[in-house]
């Protein structure tokens, strides 16, 4: 996959995990990686990293951090109706397009 994939979620979106060891957990997207088609979700997919002592981590040891998971494994939670939903594109009065909830029809991208 050489070019960036268009993701259905953005940084700051609240999502629910659909499959895997963290199925059903909700969290906020900390980082979106469109070139890899992955996202990093707060408090989900925790992994342990063994590190040697360094300037950044003088103690070293085992660090626990969130790893990236496929964007296909997460579903956006609508801020208006608080339900996991797919998105649809709706045209705004200004002529630009924005993401909207398929269940309640509420526009998700308020800033645009």
Image (spheres, rainbow, N blue to C red):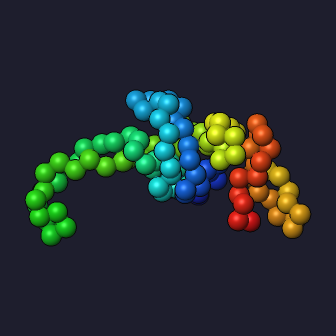
Q: Where is residue 57? Give x, y as percent.
A: 17, 63
Q: Residue, x 30% and y 42% (percent of image)?
A: 47
Would residue 104 be visible to someone looking at this image?
yes
Q: Nearer the viewer, residue 71 or 16?
A: 16
Residue situated furthest bottom in the rendering: 55
Whether residue 36 can be seen here: no
Question: In terms of depth relative to the viewer, which is nearer, 14 or 90?
Answer: 14
**Vertically, is 44 above or below 59?**
above
**Quadrant placement of the C terminus:** bottom right
The residue positioned 71% from the left and 58% from the top of the image is: 109
**Does residue 60 sit above or below 103 in this rendering?**
below
On the image, the x and y values in percent for residue 78 come to 66, 44
Which residue is pictured at 62% across the width and 43% down the height? 76
In this picture, residue 99 sits left or right of residue 54: right
Q: What's the residue at 55%, 56% (across, down)?
A: 12
The image shows residue 43, relative to residue 91, as above or below, that is above
């Amino acid at each position: 996959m050489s070019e960036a994939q268009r993701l259905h979620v953005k940084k700051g979106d609240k999502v629910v995990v659909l499959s895997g060891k963290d199925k059903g957990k909700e969290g906020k997207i900390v980082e979106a990686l469109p070139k890899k088609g992955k996202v990093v979700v707060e408090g989900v997919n925790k992994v342990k990293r063994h590190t040697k002592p360094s300037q950044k981590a003088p103690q070293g040891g085992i660090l626990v951090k969130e790893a990236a998971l496929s964007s296909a494994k997460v579903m956006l939670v609508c801020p208006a109706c608080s339900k996991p939903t797919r998105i649809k594109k709706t045209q705004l009065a200004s002529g630009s397009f924005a993401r909207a909830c398929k269940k309640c029809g509420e526009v998700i991208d308020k800033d645009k």
